[in-house]
Image (cartoon, rainbow, N blue to C red):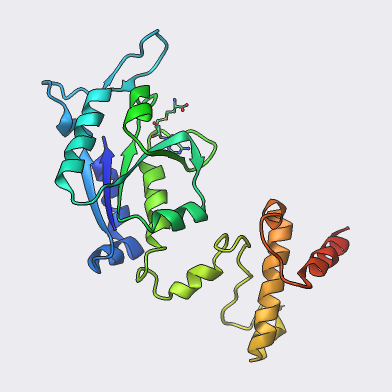
Amino acid sequence: MRVDILTLFPSMFRDPFDESMIKRAQKRGILEIYLHDLRKFTHDRHRTVDDVPYGGGGGMIMKVEPLFRAVESIRNQIKCSPEIILLSPQGHTFTQKKAQELAKERCLLLICGHYEGVDERVRQHLIDEEISVGDYVLTGGELAAMVVIDATARMLPGVLGCQDSARKDSFYDGLLDYPQYTRPAEFRSWKVPRVLLSGNHQAVEKWRREMRIEATFQKRPDLLGQIELRPGEKDLVKRIKRRRN
Ligand SMILES: C[S@@+](CC[C@H](N)C(=O)[O-])C[C@H]1O[C@@H](n2cnc3c(N)ncnc32)[C@H](O)[C@@H]1O
């Protein structure tokens, strides 16, 4: 996958993308990331990327011309046709499902806003979609872009050591993850659940599935309505409810 990032602060990305999974994905040629400094697409002496809003009010707005120039130039340089995404608090909230969908694209072009945001004509005529990383306002789109790229890159085949583990992660199939333990089997008298030491794979799988449902019920009951429970699991939810009341 190729990812182009348009930003006023390319250096913000260097360390985060030079570590761990993202670094490995790039080394293996699974992921290519290209950073573009928006100021390079200005024509004036001061390399102006922002201006005051029409109608008054505080703050600065990112100008339309450098953004169009940058996107058109990147589009002309690359072979694939990128999905153009504006990071924005007004977009659809980013989810695991969206990360899975984006991982199927060949090319992404992410636009990081700053200041009071971008000229509305960018939203109307340049981008394919807006993505938000949550209902709060960040200073700029850079951290949001990192979140989107990290979660998407994990879904690319070959990035995770064990691709199967992603399927058990929280949200992949709508449930939260089950509780995990590692050695020692006992710490300060807190013991690892006996079933995990039993060597009985069927019992372990059953316990893990029940724990996932229980964790989801306790921490994110809103998710339970969206998943398909297996036969008998509705009774399990009833039992969990009774235990809580
Ligand atoms: C200070 S914000 C502008 C907020 C804008 N005035 C609004 O209320 O919609 C500057 C930039 O940060 C990025 N940003 C802020 N919050 C974000 C969020 N929750 N998700 C994604 N990007 C965000 C966007 O790129 C945005 O253009």
Question: Is 226 situated above or below 36?
Answer: below
Which residue is at a point 38% across and 29% down the rendered structure image?
123
Question: Is 194 situated above or below 77?
Answer: below
Left or right, 174 with respect to 3, comes to: right
Between 225 and 115, the one lying in front of the other is: 225
Q: Is residue 192 visible?
A: no
Which residue is at a point 76% across and 70% down the rendered structure image?
233
- What percent of the width, then of the height, locates residue 90? 48, 32
- What percent of the width, then of the height, locates residue 48? 20, 22
Between 58 and 88, the one lying in front of the other is: 88
Ligand 1 image position (quadrant): top left
**Quadrant, the N terminus:** bottom left
Question: Is 94 situated above or below 184?
Answer: above
Between 20 and 187, the one lying in front of the other is: 20
- What percent of the width, then of the height, locates residue 239? 85, 67
What is the quadrant of residue 243 in the picture? Answer: bottom right
- What percent of the width, then of the height, locates residue 4? 26, 47
Which residue is at a point 40% across and 56% down the rendered structure image?
152
Q: How many numbered marks are there?
A: 0
Which residue is at a point 54% across and 66% down the rendered structure image?
169
Which residue reaches farthest bottom?
A: 199
